[in-house]
Structure formats: C-alpha cells, structure tokens
Image: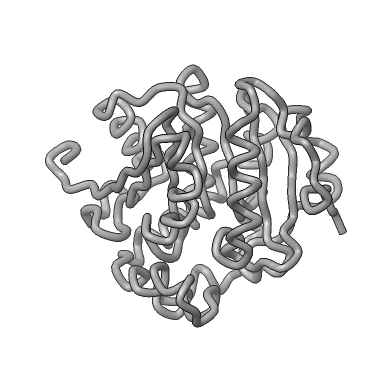
Amino acid sequence: MLDKEIVHYEVLGRGRPVIFMHGWVGSWRYWVPAMQAVSASYRAYAIDLWGFGDTAKSKKRYSLLQQVALINSFMEQMGVARVALIGHGLGAAVALLLAQSYPKVIDRVMAVACPMDETRLSARLRSGSSVELADWLLNHSAITEPARVDAPKADLPAIQNSLTELASTGLRKLLSNLPVSCLLVHGQNDPAVELPRLEDQVSMPEQTHTIIFEQSGHFPMLDEGTKFNRLLIDFLALPSGTSPRDLQLKEEWVRRVR
C-alpha cells in the first residue's frame, strides 16, 4: 500500500537493486525473463504503474509526475538507494524524469523504446484500446502472452494522459542534460516509436549511448530476449558513472544508425 492505495510489485534475487517499469501495453509480468536473467547478482523489482496491471486505478494519479512520485515513494518505503532503472515506453519516460529529479539515488538508466518527443509516436497509440494496442504491437507467441494477458487491465485514461503529457515534457532536452549514464535501446521495426535520428545521436552527451536491435519491434526484451538480457547484464556490470559507450562491444552491440 502507498498513500492508502494498492501498488503491485514483484521482487526476485539478491544484490544491488534494479527496478523494471513497463510501457503502455502490459504490466510488470513481461519483465520476468529479464528479472530472472539478472537475479543471480541483483535484486530485481518490477512494479505496476498507476492505472496498469494490479495497481490501483485512480485518474488523479495518472500524470507523469504522479508516476515518478510512485516510484520514488516505493524506493523510500523499500529502503532502495543507488538503483538502476530499466524502463520501457511509458516506463522509460518515468525513469528519465526520476533520474533528472533524484540523481543522487539513480545510478543509471536503460530506456527502451523511449520517444525523443511526442511527434515520434504513432497516432495509433492514442486511438486504440489496450487490447487493440496489444494485438498491434505483440506477436502471438508464448513469450508475449504475459503482456497480452495483462493488457486489458490498463485503464485507458492512464495511457492517454501520459501520451498527452509527453508534449510538454521535453525528453530530448532532458536526455541532453541527464546527470546519469543512460543506454537507449530501440527495435528497428518498432511501429509505435520512431528511431532516433542522426542529429539526435550526435547531440547526446558522452554518457548516453544508443543501440538498435535490428530484429525487434516495440518489445526487444521479448523479440530478442537472449540478446537483450546479455546487453542488460553487461550494462549493469559497468562501474558506476561509466559511459555505456565503454561497453565491451560485441559485434551485435555496435551502434547502427540509418
């Protein structure tokens, strides 16, 4: 319970803390393979944001700042400090805002399918129901079933409000001044979020790096799970404050910008 409201989360493993935050489709559940991959060395938390999964549905809490406050309150209640944040879509935007507001407790951020601004988002995200969005963005397979099953639990205003607020959030400027290391991950075939452009890439600071998964859509952690989890483990293993550009580059990690 947070502020007398139900907040659902799951935890796995022991070690340094990592918090996983879902996107506009699904819930904490599709992070299970990634949580399992890091659980030998890290304590992995996955949380349902306001309006999603089994966390309370309350329209007054659907702003991006309220989602940020949720994660901050959760960290305080759980005694979590110097945490790595792994966010996808909506969760990526929340992670970046958290890092901007609380740089002393956020060690690093992996932002998956994070739009540079609201113009990089497909209009279809704003018009479909949660079930329609799941059908659009997810293949029919056993690995995507957890996201598909929990998609109907989302309160549509929670999706729409966050999309509307992105227009005034200025994520591109935020990224240019982010006080922590950040790894941006995109799927080459993502129909919902446009890939970063070359001008976006060159304007990023040294502590920010972009990797494109060429066989992935909106869910690279599901489309190329083994590869994604290897990258995640490598990123988490970097010494604090190290740029993700210093990853020991395997051939598949080489940045490809078209």
Q: Where is residue 75 in the image (x, y as percent from the top left)?
A: 33, 30
Image side of residue 208 versus residue 134, left or right: right
Q: Residue at x 35, y 26 (%)?
A: 80
User: Which residue occupies the extreme left position in the image?
Assistant: 4
Image side of residue 103 versus residue 212, left or right: left
Q: How is the image coloured?
A: one colour
Q: Residue at x 60, y 67 (%)?
A: 223
**Foreground residue, 33 or 73?**
33
Above-or-below relation of 199 to 208: below
Image side of residue 72 versus residue 243, left or right: left
Above-or-below relation of 23 to 109: below
Q: Where is residue 30 in the image (x, y as percent from the top left)?
A: 43, 61
User: Which residue occupies the extreme top position in the image?
Assistant: 104
Total numbered badges shown on the rendered structure:
0
Q: Position of residue 205 (x, y in %)?
A: 76, 29
Q: Residue at x 47, y 34 (%)?
A: 41
Above-or-below relation of 175 to 52: above
**Foreground residue, 192 or 139?**
139
Q: In which quarter of the image is the C terminus?
A: bottom right
Determine which quarter of the picture holds residue 227. bottom right
Q: Where is residue 15 in the image (x, y as percent from the top left)?
A: 41, 29
**Foreground residue, 60 or 213?**
213
Image side of residue 95 versus residue 190, left or right: left
Q: In which quarter of the image is the N terminus?
A: top left
